[in-house]
Image (cartoon, rainbow, N blue to C red):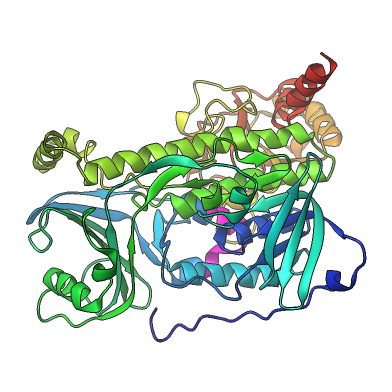
Amino acid sequence: MPDNYKNPIYPYRRAPELDCPSVPHRPVIIVGAGPTGLIAAIDLAKQGIASVLLDDNNTVSVGSRAICFSKRTLEIMDRLGCAQPMLDKGVTWQRGRVFFQEREVYDFNLLPEEGHRIPAFINLQQYYLEEYLVDRAQQLAGYIDLRWQHKVTHVDSQTDHSVVTVTTEDGDYQLSCDYLLVADGANSRIRDRLGLASTGQVFQDRFLIADVIMTADFPTERWFWFDPPFHPDQSVLLHKQPDNVWRIDFQLGWDADPDEERQEQNIRPRVQAMLGADVEFELAWTSVYTFRCRKMDHFIHNRVFFMGDAAHQVSPFGARGANGGAQSIDNLAWKLALVLKGQAPPALLDTYNTERQQGAAENILHSTRATDFITPKSPISKLFRDTTLELAETFPFARSLVNSGRLSLPCRYRHSPLNGANEPTMPAAVGPGCSAQDAPIGGGDGQRWLLNQLGDRFVLLLDGRLPADQAAALQPSLQTLLDERPLLDLLLLGPIAPALAGLPRTTLIEDPQKLVTQRYGLTAGACYLVRPDQHIAARWARFDAHHVNHAMDQVLGMHLASREIQHVTA
């Protein structure tokens, strides 16, 4: 770590349960105050659900670890009120370059279009992220009981509740809960204690991470070398982080001795050969790792929900680990909040497994393909890779075959049981299951953004730019829909006719740059139903209250509940 960063030490507090003769009950207990556990507690708190968050440590992570945070993750953090310090501190980037041996073969731009508030990626050390999340959790202390140095040592998982045993310096105590969320990392002790497996592939290669402090004129881009002269027959990745820290990943090969490679006298020559003999640098943090791509077959056991690396693990190529964990919480929290409030049936929670199994499988597939390309396993596969890189310098078609880590994109839940109607003439990028796209909007004072009007509740985005007579005809059914659906808010794109003014729970927006219209393929009367996690549930070319009601029942899992009842009856 840089000398100017000091890990915060969070205080241990004696648990009141140590003096309680009975076992107190809580709605939600979360194990693990890393990024995934903290995000879960914050998301639930924003939706009015209290939790106890337990961690066996008293500080943030050591070393930079996860550093690349994608646009979708930052949008989630923005919804949670955590994005601005990340954006202020992080290194923003959207361009990457790919090198083969001594030359650049091509570059790419991850966000070439204008009209987005959130950048394609930022680089930020994980310890900063965790510190910002703890700060946000402390702002929500009325809902989040964050306990440091409280180690979960036993879990009794039943079909309708769980009981955890917690060990502290003052002794052991027990808590019961309706739902237990497990975010205790890739080597999850709770997963092992419950006899649950996480299966996949171990990749026979080793990589060295070297966090280097230096003043350099490299641009803030992602640079990836295949077989460079300074590290022949291997690959190297370079990223800039805050505080003049640069992340360098060196491929070492399976035969490398991890203990030897960690020695500074062996690391320095590699870094010096890359940077040049005259460049001065300091080593801030180093690690040698071998990675696995694996996941649990089911993320739910009774009322225990596994999240983040405890549920699924991928290689670092493509920045899919921490980003995938954030998307998992984004998927789970609103469903759990609705169930705990009695606004949706428990069967809705099964769709966390359905949808995030797809997300985890996609991440593992992309990570595995990237690893196979970066570390070819045979002379034939190496010949294919090198030929592809040669062609990529001249022929655009070959660039799509180069895989130095397909960077994290939001998962589209294409076959989710929660998806409703799809109007095929509208843009595929915002179809049912897709995350909503941002765009600048007018209305109110100052610049505003569409995504800031979505999230934490259901929203009907309706193009209200209708003739006066059509607006008047639409108004009664809209009024009735909003009266009968207290979970639904209306986002009305104007200018609107007077008949649509004064509807309850309605926000009026404008589209001065026409980007909302363009990105959503809107015409007068068209509408989108958006879930609390900012994913599209259904869309129609013309508003119809009956269709919206049907889609709301579907996304709330009412059809799942009826299937559950039929199954029990049978």
Judging depth in this view, the residue of 24 and 469 nearest the camera is 24
In percent of the image, x 80 and y 73: which residue is there? 15
* Residue 381 drawn above or below residue 33: above
Q: In this image, 27 relative to 322: left or right?
A: right
Which residue occupies the extreme right position in the image? 21
Q: In this image, 448 relative to 411: left or right?
A: right
Residue 357 lies, in percent from the top left, at: 54, 36
Which residue occupies the extreme top position in the image? 570
* Residue 452 drawn above or below residue 546: below
* Residue 134 drawn above or below residue 325: below
In percent of the image, x 38 and y 63: which residue is there? 92
Residue 414 lies, in percent from the top left, at: 52, 28
Region in magenta? 75-85
Viewport quadrant of the C terminus: top right
Q: In this image, 82 relative to 482: left or right?
A: left
Is 433 in the magenta? Answer: no
**In the picture, residue 151 is in which quadrant?**
bottom right
Q: Is residue 508 visible?
A: no
Residue 286 lies, in percent from the top left, at: 33, 71
